[in-house]
């Protein structure tokens, strides 16, 4: 098999899946941080209502 | 509420599995199953995901346009969340298309970049949508921010048909369209490309969905913060 420019193909595929995975990971982290923030604020509000 | 959350997690898990399977099949199709192209050889294998990412980006910008129009007509924040989510995902796919195009161009054309109609209009598209989140950061009032972004988004969308039709309208070094012209591409190559199209379109939808959820949570945090401040002020009085 002619594997000319194998390096270019590897670089392109690594870039594609690298950027997609990093993006998915950062969105997941941001979602989980915001979920925690929502829970924390809800608890603060509930505590305020009880007092 | 807990039931809704469980259903959402289950739906996300199922969609992640389906998208992963599609991506796996697309990678297999592009790297192993599709025959080697005669002139470009192994380098041509970049094409399957380069074209699919460019298409996913254009679809994402269509979703952004729907969100922009939806907000201008209905004034509901959910449309603004959809547009914001679409812009970020569209930018990711445009970046991939531009970078993989350059990686392909260097060995194929001898240069990293050519200022022809397709590449220049795609770069303009990327720059226009980069401005979108920057513009949002300049406006504090949520309603004003959504209106300004929707109007700007509708303006930026004008470049989408320009990118798509540039290869017909102007003479360009970029390869001509082969997807909707049967007979131009080998049958197995065509199927591998179609598989990449489906896999990346599915991934794009999943990413927008997840990013939309983030925007909704951000909105919920803002509302809860206002409520907490209001409660604290009431307590002080």
Image: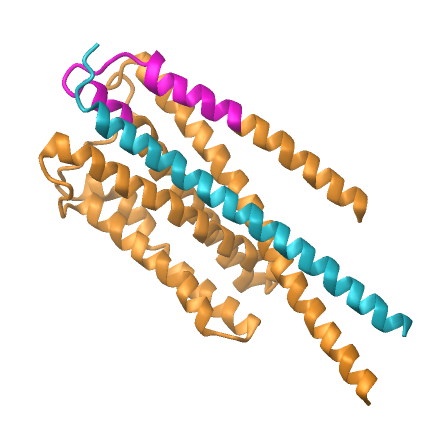
Chain colours: A cyan, B orange
Q: Residue at x 27, y 41 (%)?
A: B99
User: Residue B9 placed where, x, y %?
Assistant: 69, 39
Left or right of B82 in this view: B183: left
Residue B188 in view? yes
| Image: magenta residue range | B20-46
Quarter of the image for the N terminus of chain A: give it: top left
State whether the magenta stretch is mostly helix, strand or loop. Answer: helix
Q: Residue at x 13, y 44 (%)?
A: B114
- From the viewer's perspective, is residue B52 above or below residue B3? above
Q: Quadrant of residue A4?
A: top left
Depth check: A18 or B157 in front?
Answer: A18
Depth check: A30 or B89 in front?
Answer: A30
User: Residue A22 placed where, x, y %?
Assistant: 45, 43
- From the viewer's perspective, is residue B53 above or below residue B134? above
- From the viewer's perspective, is residue B233 above or below residue A48? below
Depth check: B178 or A3 in front?
Answer: A3
Q: Quadrant of residue B48?
A: top left
Q: Residue at x 56, y 57 (%)?
A: B81
Quarter of the image for the C terminus of chain A: give it: bottom right
Q: Residue at x 45, y 47 (%)?
A: B89
- From the viewer's perspective, is residue A3 above or below residue A45? above
Whether the magenta-drawn stretch holds residue B136 is answered as: no
Left or right of A27 in this view: B234: right
Whether the magenta-drawn stretch holds residue B30 is answered as: yes
Left or right of B125 in this view: B41: left
Residue B51 in view? no
């Amino acid at each position: 098999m002619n594997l000319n420019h194998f390096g270019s193909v590897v670089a392109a595929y690594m870039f594609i899946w690298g950027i997609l995975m990093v993006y998915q990971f950062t969105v997941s982290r941001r979602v989980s941080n915001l979920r925690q923030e929502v829970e924390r604020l809800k608890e603060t509000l509930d505590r305020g209502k009880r007092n | 509420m807990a039931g809704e959350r469980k259903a959402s997690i289950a739906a996300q898990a199922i969609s992640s599995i389906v998208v992963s399977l599609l991506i796996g099949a697309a990678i297999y199709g592009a790297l192993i199953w599709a025959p080697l192209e005669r002139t470009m050889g192994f380098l041509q294998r970049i094409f399957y995901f380069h074209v699919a990412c460019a298409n996913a980006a254009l679809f994402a910008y269509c979703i952004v346009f729907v969100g922009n129009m939806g907000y201008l007509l209905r004034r509901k924040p959910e449309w603004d969340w959809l547009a914001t989510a679409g812009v970020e995902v569209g930018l990711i796919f445009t970046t991939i298309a531009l970078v993989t195009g350059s990686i392909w161009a260097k060995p194929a054309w001898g240069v990293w970049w050519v200022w022809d109609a397709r590449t220049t209009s795609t770069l303009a598209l990327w720059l226009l949508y980069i401005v979108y989140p920057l513009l949002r950061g300049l406006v504090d009032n949520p309603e004003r921010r959504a209106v300004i972004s929707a109007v700007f988004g509708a303006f930026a969308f004008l470049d989408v048909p320009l990118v798509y039709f540039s290869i017909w309208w102007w003479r360009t070094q970029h390869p001509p369209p082969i997807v909707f012209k049967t007979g131009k591409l080998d049958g197995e190559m065509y199927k591998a490309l179609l598989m990449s199209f489906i896999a990346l379109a599915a991934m794009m939808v999943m990413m927008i969905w997840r990013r939309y959820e983030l925007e909704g949570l951000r909105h919920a945090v803002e509302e809860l913060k206002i409520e907490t401040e209001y409660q604290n002020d009431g307590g002080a009085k």
